[in-house]
Structures are given as C-alpha cells and as structure tokens.
Image (cartoon, coloured by chain):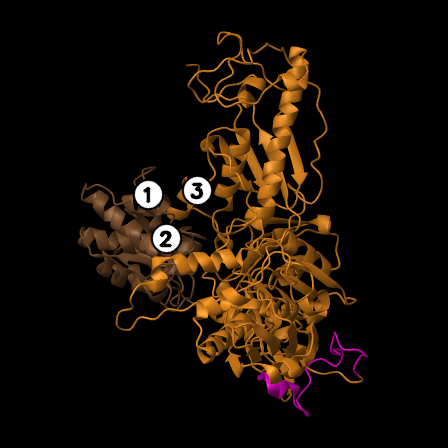
Amino acid sequence: MTKIHVSTTVNGDAAEFLCEPASSLLDVLRDTLGLTGSKEGCGSGDCGACTVMLDGEMVCSCLVLAAEAEGRTVATIEGVAEGSVLHPVQQKFLEHAALQCGFCTPGFIVAAKALLDRNPNPTETEVRYWLAGNLCRCTGYDKIVRAVMAAAAELRQERTPA
Amino acid sequence: MNAPETMKPFRHIGTRPVRPDGVDKVTGRALYSPDFKAPGMLWGAILRSPHPHARIVSIDTKKAEALAGVKAVATGRDMPTLESLVMHVGEGASDIVDVSHNCLAFDKVLYEGHAVAAVAATSPEIAREALGLIAVEYEELPFVLGLEEALAEGAPVLHDNVFTKGVEPKPDKPSNAAMRVEMGGGDIEGALASAAATVSGRYTLQPVHQGYIEPHACVASWNGDGQAQIWTSSQGHFAVRSLTASVLAMPQADIRVTPLEIGGGFGGKTTIYLEPVAMVLSKKSGRPVRLAMTREEVFRATGPAPGAVIDVRLGAAADGTLVAVDVQFLYHSGAFTANDAGAGVASAIGHYRIANTRVVGTEVLCNRPAAKAYRAPGAPQVNFAVESAMDELAARLGIDPLDFRLKNAAAEGDPQTSGLPWGRIGYIECLEAAKAHPHWSAPLGPNQGRGVAGGYWGNYGGPSTVNVSVAEDGTITVATGSPDIGGSRASMAIMAAEVLDVPYEQVRAVVADTASIGVSMVTGGSRTTFATGMATVQAAGEVKRLLRERAARMWGVATDQVEWRSGPAMSASCATPPFRMSAPRSTRTTSKARSRAAPRRASAGRSTRPISTARTAGSITRASSITGCRWPPTCR
C-alpha cells in the first residue's frame, strides 16, 4: 500500500506524517503523533470523544481522513491548556466534578471551548444543544452543563455561579 | 443508615476537593487502556464468528501466518485444556473453562461475534488483512435467542455438559436452563385466593449493554522465563490476574497487571476478554502484543445485562397489607452461565414484609454474548417488574402508591427473602422523607408525572488492601488495589487526611499494580468507598499508632503520653536539623483481617526531642513532628 505524506499543524506546531489512505485523523493523532488525549469511543461519530478542531471547525476526528489534514490546522485537547495553566473550561470541570471516569472529558472540553470561543454568553439550552454530540455515560450531563456555564461566566469575568 | 447516632464534626469528610487525578483527565494526559503502547509492540486483531451457533470443523491459518509482517496467529487450540473451576472474582462467579472458551472458542461458536482466532502483526492494517486469510470451516447449527424458545422442547442445546444447577435430583439430560434458584415460603395460592385484591402481569426486558465509552483494550508481554506483564483497564486488576493465570494455567505471581485508567465499566469490566489471547500471541511472537476492540466488537462480544421474562402475582388485604407474592423470572445467561439469578431472587421482594412468598429465578443459555454484571447485577430487572405490579395493586386498592409501600416496607429485624434478618436498611425512613418532600405534593404541570419505586441491593464488603506510607518530609501516599472508576483516589485521600488530621493536599492516592499491593477485590458491588475506605482508615490509624509509639520511645515516655493533634508540634528549635528516618514508615492493613503492622525498623539518626504540646495556627502536624520533618517544608 502506498502511504500518503501529510504536512499539517497540530496545536500550533508543524507536524508531518505518513499515513494509509484509509487512516482516520484520530488514528494518526493517537498512534502516529502520540496524542492519545482524543479518544475513540465508537469510531462512527456518535460519541464525540474524538472531538478536535480542524481549521477552527469542530469535527469528529474518527470521521476525518488523516490525509484531509494536509495544509490545515488541527487543535486537540492537548493544546487547550496554556502550558500548565488550565483553560477555564478545564478548571470548572474539576471544580464542578463534571467528570467521573474521564474518558469522554477531552471531547466535551474541546467542544465546550469551541462554543465559548464563538459565543461567550450561551444560554443553558444553547450549551445543551451544542454538547448534544458528546456522550457521557457516568456523570450525567447536569454537572457538565454547570461547569460550562461557570467557565463562560469566568471568561466574561463575571462572578461564578455557585 | 448505619452511620453513628452522634456524628463527630469532620475536617475533610463531606468536603468536595478537586480529585487528585483531575488535571490529567481534563488535559488528555491520563492513560486509558487503548492509549498504552509498549516498545516493540505488535498490533493484534481478532477474527469473530459470523454465525450464532456452529461447530468449528477446521481452522487453516497457514496463509495468514505467511503474510509479511504477521508474527503470530492463535486459535482455541493454543489455550491450555482446563478442569472446571468456578472462581468468584467479581460480582458473580465464572467457570474458568467458560472464561477461556469465551476468550477464544474451542470447538463451537456460541454467538455471532464469538472470537475464533487472533493475529499479531507489525501494523494494525496487516493484522486486519491477515484475519481475511484465515479459513474457518463451520458446520452451522440451529440457534436460539429467546428465553422461552430456549427452554422449549426440541430447542438447540448449547452445552451438552450443563445440567440445571439447583434442581434435585440432577436432571437426566442437559438443557439450556443453566440454574434455578428458589426462595420463599408459606401458602401462596391460599393467600392469593383470600386476598381482597390481586394483580398479575408479565414483564419483558431486552438485554442492555453496559455501554462504557472506553472499548476493551490491553497490552500483554510474556517473557521466555514465564514472567508476564499486562497493562489494561478493568474494575479489578487482581481479577484480571487471577482469571488470566487460571485460564493460562500459570502462577498468579508470574503476571504483573498494571491498572490503566478505566473509561467506565458499570460491572461489565469485572471479567476478561482479551488478556489471555494477547498473552498467547505475545508468547508465540516473543513481543508485547496489543489487542483492542472496536465499538462494534464491544457490542457483539461483551456484556450485556440479561434480558428477562418476569411473571408477577401480588395479593393484598383491603387495608393494603401484602399477603402473597409469587415471582417467576427467566434471565438471559447468554452463551455461558452468568450467575445473576441468585441476586435477582434475593432482590425481588426483599424490601417488603410479606407472609407468603415464592421467588423462582432461572438462567437461560442462548446464542447471545454471555451476560455480565451491570449495576446491581440481577436486581433492576425483577425490581422493575415487582414495583410496576405494586403500582397496579395500589391503584386497585385505591391507596397512594407511596403509602402502600410504606405500609409493607421491611425494617430492622424483618426477614429477608433468604430468611436472614434485615439490619438498619432505612427503607421506611427513606419513604417517609420522600413523602414529606415538597416534590411529592407539588402540583404537576402538563406532560409531567410522578412515581415511586423501591429497590434492593446489598453493600458488598470483600477484601481490600491499602498501604499508607509517610515520606521523609511528612507527606503521605495512600496506595490501594482498587481501580479508580470515578473518584476513589479522592475518597481515600480524604479519609486518610481525616484520620491523620492533615491537609488533603498532604495526602496523595495512587492505584498500585498487582505486584505492589496485596490482593483487592474488584471495584464493584458498591464496595470500594466502604471496604477500601475501611482499609484506608485502618492503615492510617496504624500509622498514627506506630508513630506515637516511636515518639514515646524516643522521648522515653509512655505511649499514652503522646497525643496526636492537629496543629504544629514544633521540634525543639527550627534551627535543629530535621531528624530523618532511615526509610519512610509504611503500614498495611486488609479490611478483612485485623490491622497488621509492617515489620518494625530500627530507628536511625539522631533524635531531637520535639515539644509535644507546642501549637500554632499553622498546619504542621504531629505526624510531621514525629518524623522530625515539617509540612509545609518551610519553617514559619
């Protein structure tokens, strides 16, 4: 099988890799680039655990071919914190206990950050609809929604709701 | 409800600190099962049966073995032949012959998706390609999926060596009724005949998968000298060790299982599917081998909770007193005996006080994946049926459904279905609290409803091992053998900090591998906070006792003269160089056994004499003063 050479940008750094034509972006992120923060829960775009940003658009990386990353910009959960400083969404997930097993958490955080980047003042309904593509099996969604609302308030520099 | 009548105020219990594993899990750094890779690792793949029931006539693996990059191929013939042995490792029991044959089919495939052969290769693509080169000749057999169909005369029988357990005398021919459990007593028919009101109904439920988001995965490395390592996520790495060792007929201590973070289990990760197969592939190839399921494989070959057909008859007197209940249920067992029926029988009506009872549960083998534990395994199905019938009977009697339950609720001293008396279960108190809550009487809006149901589940104990170590600087590590499926590191750190009366951040909790801590039962059965927590509390108490004893010896006073108090117990002078022990004090207890101190080490170094009563408003503790160190490690 002939492999495809791909040049792309991942979390701000140039990245190059060879991949099979059928490889998903998720496979390459996890197995070739060692970025295992994005998870494969289903491989069919149902669970959202593999959510990453591709040129600023939220995608299920299990449904994107790795070759499609050529010349584009990928952002994953590993790039959400700035160094050791957590993004408010990450911090609020911890404070609100919005994770139990934590396996779905990277996808939720990438998706929630994408929402707040475009709408820093979402309603609870907007948060729930935005996160409808992410499945959590343990915690229930309430704590997640509260964490995202609290992160939004913090980003707006308002007082965090209790 | 078993809480002490008078609660002492707690410093940490009841607080909600950030969990110690939190940052790793919000940054994507936490290593789950599918994330782990070993140097030189091969990629495995499993060939699964397209038939629900078939005899394996032959498997030809030659072409697959010849494919460039393929390093090993395994079939059921590569697994050792085993004597039947029922092992209790998780929530339920399994025969290791069944476990082995579920990991890799031996002579028959018993469900669509049953593993038939496995390959290890230098890339996942080659491994998948090799699967297509394995030629399996099947002799298809009639199959059966439904519960009553599987028990019908002439139904295809899955195992010719299964004779219904729990029936005396032993049946003269094998059947799909794997086991029958019956409890109860009294005159059901007489009581139903004289009841003021009766209801009867049939309730059917489909099998439901546990649905953890993390698919199963593992890496195994089996060396030529017989020693092996397995990296996997599970609800119990000691269960992974004992089951894998038993299936492979090898010593348990030759396997070291390192627990990776677990992405949900819900009971379904209390067994093994991939580990022995990865081990065999590793032995054959001489390299570490990774096996991982896709979501499709998870649904085809693991779990689920059993589906059920449940017949309920209930009768009550005019005043609402339950007089008789008759529950008969069939549970899917799937391809192998699952052992959920006993818990279902015990759970069905145990929370009510009824004079005449009969509960009969039967596990039924059929051509589906073997049923596995799922959140109170065996209980919710039958509770759903009984509680639905309770609502119907309450309506027939014209009694509020909550009052109906309250009238019949079991309390301390009442017999359970098994005959054993109840402890303080709090069912009545719980119902009364619900009744008093404003939500029970608030007016309902459009499309709103309100209901009440009771349920039964036991809080399981079981063995847990915890190791509490004090570092040279007085900080503390709590190591447990219990996988952290949703925050138990935080629970253990809170409990240890409470006992040792130190800040939460001074205690760090880890989950240790099977070579680094004693045997611990699975994280399941609602037991971990309770049992592993008990071991944590005991071990932390033991640390306190040992350090007080040591301080007493150093100071030349009786042990009862040394107090353990919060606040700093300053050493004689901050200018005094800190006293260091030769090694951190470590102690270990098992919650089943009495606390047992680690062997004493001789004290080393100089002993400065701390002033045991000195206190300031800081956070330095007696623990740190006794080790001669300070927390935080700067003098104030």
Residue carrying label 3: B19
The chain under label 2 reads: A
Q: Which residue occupies the foreground of this view, A142 or A122?
A: A142
Kind of residue at disc 3: Arg
Q: In the rendered structure, which segment of residues is drawn in magenta?
A: B143-171
| Left or right: B32, with B282 as reference point | left
Residue carrying label 2: A106
Q: Quadrant of residue B285?
A: bottom right
Question: Disc 2 or disc 1, which is closer to the eye?
Answer: 1
Mark 3 secondary-structure assignment: loop
**Figure colour of chain A:** brown
The chain under label 1 reads: A
| Letter of the chain shown orange in the rendering | B
Residue carrying label 1: A91
Kind of residue at disc 2: Pro
Who comes first in sequence, dot 2 or dot 1?
Answer: 1
Whether residue B8 appears in magenta in the rendering, the answer is no
Mark 1 secondary-structure assignment: helix
Q: CA distance from mark 2 to mark 1?
A: 13 Å
